[in-house]
Image (cartoon, rainbow, N blue to C red):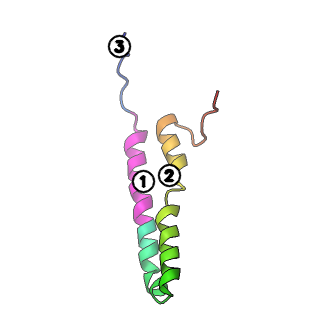
Amino acid sequence: MNKPLTPPSWRKPAGMLAILGIILLWSVLIVSASDYIGQMHILAQAIIYLIAGTIWIAPLRPLLIWIETGSFKAPPVI
């Protein structure tokens, strides 16, 4: 009836630290480019910040898969 509890994996805290590291690295990169971006037209700034605000999510998918499965590839769908 009840499934036995499994001990927590070390991948979860390591993955959380990696996610925080990715966010920190990306934010430092964008902030360091803010002087250059700030000199652009307001619409160009909006587009750049819109793209920069969403593109950091791309490396998270394989990382989240690794946290759950231990492999960077998604398991096959049956």
Q: Identify the secondary structure beneath mark 2.
A: helix
Which residue position is annotated with label 2?
60
Q: Is residue 55 above or below residue 12?
A: below
Could you say where residue 55 lies in the image, as x and y percent from the top left?
53, 62
Residue positioned most to the top: 1
- The reply to whether callout 1 and callout 2 are in contact (CB within 8 Å) is yes
Which amino acid, mark 2? Leu
Q: Where is residue 31 in the image (x, y as percent from the top left)?
A: 41, 76
- Residue annotated with mark 1: 19
Is 74 above or below relative to 58? Answer: above
For image coordinates 47% across by 90% down, the residue present is: 39
Q: What residue type is labelled 3?
A: Asn
Secondary structure mostly seen in magenta is helix
Q: How far apart are marks 1 and 2 (CA)?
A: 7 Å
- Foreground residue, 74 or 47? 47
- Residue 15 part of the magenta segment: yes
The answer to whether 74 is drawn above or below residue 54 in the figure is: above
Quadrant location of the N terminus in the rendered image: top left
Find disc 3 in the rendering and name its residue: 2
Q: Which amino acid does label 1 sit on?
A: Ile
Mark positioned earlier in the residue sequence (3 or 1): 3
The residue carrying pointer 1 sits among few (fewer than 14), some (14 to 19) or many (20 or more) residues within 10 Å by Cα, namely some
Residue range in magenta is: 9-25
Image coordinates of residue 58 in percent, x first then y, are 54, 56
Q: Where is residue 43 in the image (x, y as percent from the top left)?
A: 51, 81
